[in-house]
Amino acid sequence: MSAGPFFDREAETAPREVLKARQLDRVRKIIAVAFERSPFYQRKYRAAGLSSAEDVRSLDDLHYLPFTTKDELVADHEEHPPFGSRMTEPRERYIRLHQTSGTSGKPLRILDTEESWQWFVRGWGYVYNAAGVGATDRVFAAFSFGPFIGFWAGFEGAAHVGALRIPGGGQTTGQRIQQIFDLGATVLICTPTYALRMADTAREMGVDLRASPIRIGIHAGEPGASIPSTRARLEQAWGMEVFDHPGMTEVGAWGFECREHAGVHLNEAECLFEVLDPATGDPGDEGELVITTLGRFAHPNIRYRTGDRVHVLRDPCGCGRTFYRLDGGVIGRIDDMLIVRGVNVFPSAIENIVRRFDGVHEFVVEVYRDREMDEMEIKVEATAEDLAALLQAIQNEVHLRMGFRPIVSAAPAGTLPRFELKARRVLDRRQ
Ligand SMILES: [Zn+2]
């Protein structure tokens, strides 16, 4: 498999010690800017007893700095409406507003200056190059162009490879499918859930997406493209090569997948990453991902607790990049892990099982308590000649893999929620 082009070959293949020296240099710069100009970080660091950025002499010293959490940013927004107090530049220098989806709490509003926005967009330059997207490609953004940042940056970032950008907002799913054929779009950017929804709609329209000009799908907003059975479904429905791209409104476009498809690369040229055991806070191979941005000076994020659970791989990748990788991308949210009858269950693990079955269109999972016992019910929208047999097979597979037997029931066609962004398919009703 070809490694594909690089966005910045020198940075992406730099020896680890060179990479680390650059990270230290840049992290000190961003801490200095935050300390001097961000009211939010000034309060935070003074309270922590930090007198200046000079106190950080090595990457290990970073451990003495307090984390930045989503709860803190939400509280800061409430105290300093409407944008919070994290910015480092005079207000008139900010030119873009985006906000988080608000799926895990109140939305955060993030302002960027031209420079900080271009830093975010550049993150997509790595994404596209690693996927082998180039100037002859036509990128279709199946996205409503609302306040969510991801595909705005994806749309603009395609300029870094000279591709033609096609905005797919303000259209029905059917119209988007038609546009893809009419305009010869070769790259699809959207959430994995939405790409599957388009596949459902195409089936209803009698359109075979494998005959479409789309050759590459880049999927962000949810971890689905790294879930093996969801990826297989995307590849099968569209006949395309699938790439996962994790990013965060608050942080940036921090990860990308190369053509080796060996996990998701951390973009260590643009961010500094820590993986910490959520219970002890000690560094490790598996745990919560903590990110410090090394650019976006106008809206810095230092030691941000993402809430994402990851497993880091440190061995070299076949593509030649020295950036570490995440095995299977983002495994799940730290706080999304359910304990059902004593078994640790990640929503992504259930998705991986359910999506393996042909005929499943959509599903939701509810966990509740019945006579002191945890019950998991999986409601499935599916078409099958023998629906009962399909439900039985899903039940058996969950039982085999998870060690408990869920209730699996059929939901009438079109009754389960459809998502364009941030699918929430698992409901814990025990709380
Ligand atoms: Zn690679």
Image (cartoon, rainbow, N blue to C red):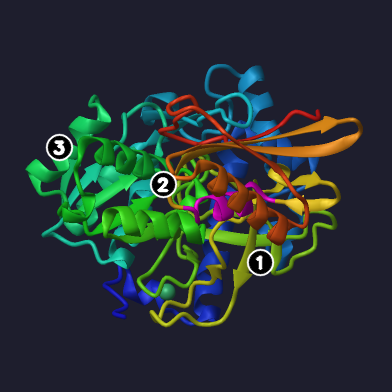
Where is residue 296? Give x, y as percent.
45, 46
Say what amino acid the circle numbered 1 marks: Leu
Q: Residue at label 1?
A: 59
Res 124 visible: no
Q: Nearer the viewer, residue 172 or 376?
A: 376
Q: Nearer the viewer, mark 3 or mark 1?
A: 3
Q: Residue furthest left?
A: 182
Say what amino acid the circle numbered 3 marks: Gln
Where is residue 138? Give x, y as percent.
15, 51
Q: Nearer the viewer, residue 117 or 305?
A: 305
- Indicate the quadrant containing the C terminus: top left, top right, bottom left or bottom right: top right
Which residue is located at x 57 percent, y 17 percent? 81
Q: Quadrant of ligand 1?
A: bottom left
Q: Label 1 crowding class (10 Å Cα cut-off): few <14, some 14-19, many 20+?
A: some
Q: Earlier in the sequence, mark 3 or mark 2?
A: 3
The kind of secondary structure element at disc 2 is helix
* Up/down of 382 relative to 59, above or below: above
Residue 192 disc label: 2
* Mark 3 Cβ and ligand 1 under 8 Å apart: no
The stretch of residues the image draws in magenta is: 346-357
Reply yes or no: does residue 258 show up in magenta: no
Where is residue 268? Give x, y as percent.
50, 65
Say what amino acid the circle numbered 2 marks: Pro
The kind of secondary structure element at disc 1 is helix
Q: CA distance from mark 1 to mark 2?
A: 35 Å
Q: CA distance from mark 3 to mark 2?
A: 19 Å
Residue 178 disc label: 3
Reply yes or no: does residue 351 show up in magenta: yes
- Indicate the quadrant containing the N terminus: top left, top right, bottom left or bottom right: bottom left
* Mark 2 Cβ and ligand 1 under 8 Å apart: no
